[in-house]
Image: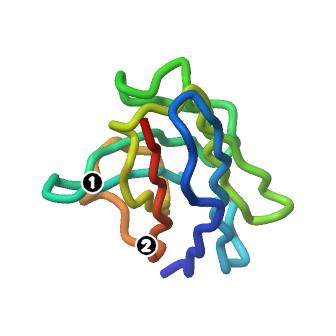
């Protein structure tokens, strides 16, 4: 398994921006597809974005498309989630996840998870 540590969450006003980071402790980071998921209070965990091993292919949930950007730096073993035009409905704990092979939009296909970072968007 991969150890993942998220950072960058916080409190921001609606319309603001945040950048989340997820640092991976694994020698073969470039072998892993990475994903971001989020879970709001009382709701199920939902897919946000994923990126393939090279960083050249990314996919987004409709709810964040055009506002969020996922990227990765394999030299730094880090994946990022740049969030812009934040809305109160983006408030959630954000988790990064890793899996070998192809990226996926299903949480059950990821086998390594971080502890999560809280993002709160005030109206």
Q: Residue at x 39, y 51 (%)?
A: 37
* Tag 1 secondary structure: loop
Between the residue at mark 2 and the residue at mark 1, the CA separation in whole angstroms equals 20 Å
- Which percent across, then down, holds residue 74? 78, 56
Height in image: 57 above or below 51?
above
Height in image: 90 above or below 96?
above
Q: Residue at x 47, y 22 (%)?
A: 65
Q: Residue at x 44, y 28 (%)?
A: 64
Q: Is residue 101 left or right of residue 15?
A: left
Residue under label 2: 112
- Which percent across, then down, holds residue 9? 58, 59
Q: Residues within 10 Å of mark 2 (few under 14, many from 20)?
A: some
- Which percent across, then down, holds residue 16? 62, 34
Q: Residue at x 44, y 61 (%)?
A: 95
Mark closer to the observer (2, 1): 1
Q: Are marks 2 and 1 in contact (CB under 8 Å)?
A: no
User: Mark 2 or mark 1: which comes first in sequence?
Assistant: 1
Q: Specify the quadrant of the image occupied by residue 70.
A: top right
Front position in the image: 79 or 45: 45
Q: Is residue 83 left or right of residue 72?
A: left
The numbered mark at residue 40 is 1
Front position in the image: 60 or 87: 87
Height in image: 56 above or below 73?
above
Q: Is residue 68 left or right of residue 8?
A: left
């Amino acid at each position: 398994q991969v150890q993942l540590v998220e950072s960058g969450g916080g409190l921001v006003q609606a319309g603001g921006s945040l950048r989340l980071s997820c640092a991976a402790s694994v020698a073969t980071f470039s072998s892993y597809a990475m994903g971001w998921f989020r879970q709001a209070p009382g709701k199920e965990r939902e897919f946000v974005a994923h990126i393939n091993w090279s960083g050249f292919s990314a996919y987004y949930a409709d709810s964040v498309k055009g506002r969020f950007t996922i990227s990765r730096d394999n030299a730094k073993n880090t994946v990022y989630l740049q969030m812009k035009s934040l809305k109160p409905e983006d408030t959630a704990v954000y988790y990064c996840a890793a899996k070998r092979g192809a990226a996926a939009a299903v949480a059950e296909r990821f086998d390594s998870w971080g502890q999560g970072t809280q993002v709160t968007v005030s109206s």
